[in-house]
Amino acid sequence: MDLGLADRHVLVTGASRGIGHACAAGFLREGARLTLVARDPARLEAAAAALRAAQPGARVAVQAADLRDAAAAAAMIDAAEAAGGPVEVLVNSAGAARRTPVEELTPAAWQDAMQAKFFAGVHVMEPLARRMAGRGAGAVVNVIGAGGKVASPIHLPGGAANAALMLVTAGLAAALGPRGVRVNAVNPGLTQTDRLQEGLAADARRQGISVDEAAARATARLPLGRMARPEEIADAVLFLASARASYVNGAVLAMDGALTPMI
């Protein structure tokens, strides 16, 4: 299936690892031009080099920025568009709030979660979506997380940030749809990334068990019998970003394998 993404300028935040990196690889296979964004310059350059090595001729630029800082995010958008032209697709995959059992919560944990996930997303999504609206076209896909739908005792601050991002997704979709911009989200559940280990460690502390036992129990609860691969989440992101999803707007796609059956 041709997704119609060839030559599109796609900006991916959180692109140095995990789901963001898998999304970047997927867009490159579709022939898109990429700007990768992450906070750590060394990790970002390594991720770009890996993508170029895997796909010779890949058009990959990088912009290091701390997206928790609104001014830094705005400067990053300016630089990305100056170098690569108008951004036509935004994949917001940056930021992950630390998983913390209730007994370990502090006021700083709540603040950090909003900065790490909510503001890191909004500081890019809102100004870039308005630029897209001014040009009359664009697509935004936010990679958020299932913790925003169901409260978890080890993910309350992060879940609250995720829920806020879902509301902004729906609101911007309604506000900017008439101006040619679609805004959608995917909510991954347990996915095989580096960040998974942090969550399993927090769950293990809460239950007083080993990390391996926490992983085994978590997997046993999954209806599909396994955790997701980053590439599987990326496939959904690519579809939502493409013209094949031209009438999908304001959707929040659950990708937890039906762990939490809900409508």
Image: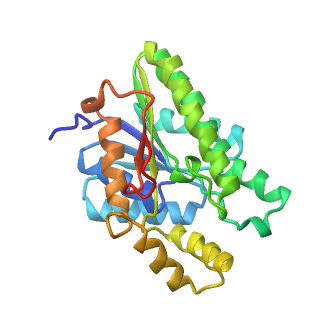
Outermost residue on the left side: it is 1
Where residue 172 appears, x then y in whole percent? Answer: 54, 25
Where residue 235 appears, x then y in whole percent? Answer: 30, 50
Q: Nearer the viewer, residue 186 or 84?
A: 186
* Quarter of the image with the N terminus in it: top left
Q: Nearer the viewer, residue 50 or 213?
A: 213
Identify the residue shown where x is 46% and y is 66%.
46
Q: How does the figure colour the protein chain or chains?
A: rainbow
* Quarter of the image with the C terminus in it: top left
As displayed, is residue 8 above or below residue 29?
above
Identify the residue shown where x is 52% and y is 47%.
144
Q: Nearer the viewer, residue 79 or 102?
A: 102
As displayed, is residue 204 above or below residue 164?
below
Outermost residue on the top side: it is 178
Left or right: residue 80 versus residue 224 is: right
Left or right: residue 105 versus residue 236 is: right
Residue 236 visible to an observer of this rendering:
yes
Identify the residue shown where x is 51% and y is 52%.
146
Residue 78 visible to an observer of this rendering:
no
Identify the residue shown where x is 59% and y is 39%.
165
Q: Nearer the viewer, residue 52 or 13?
A: 13
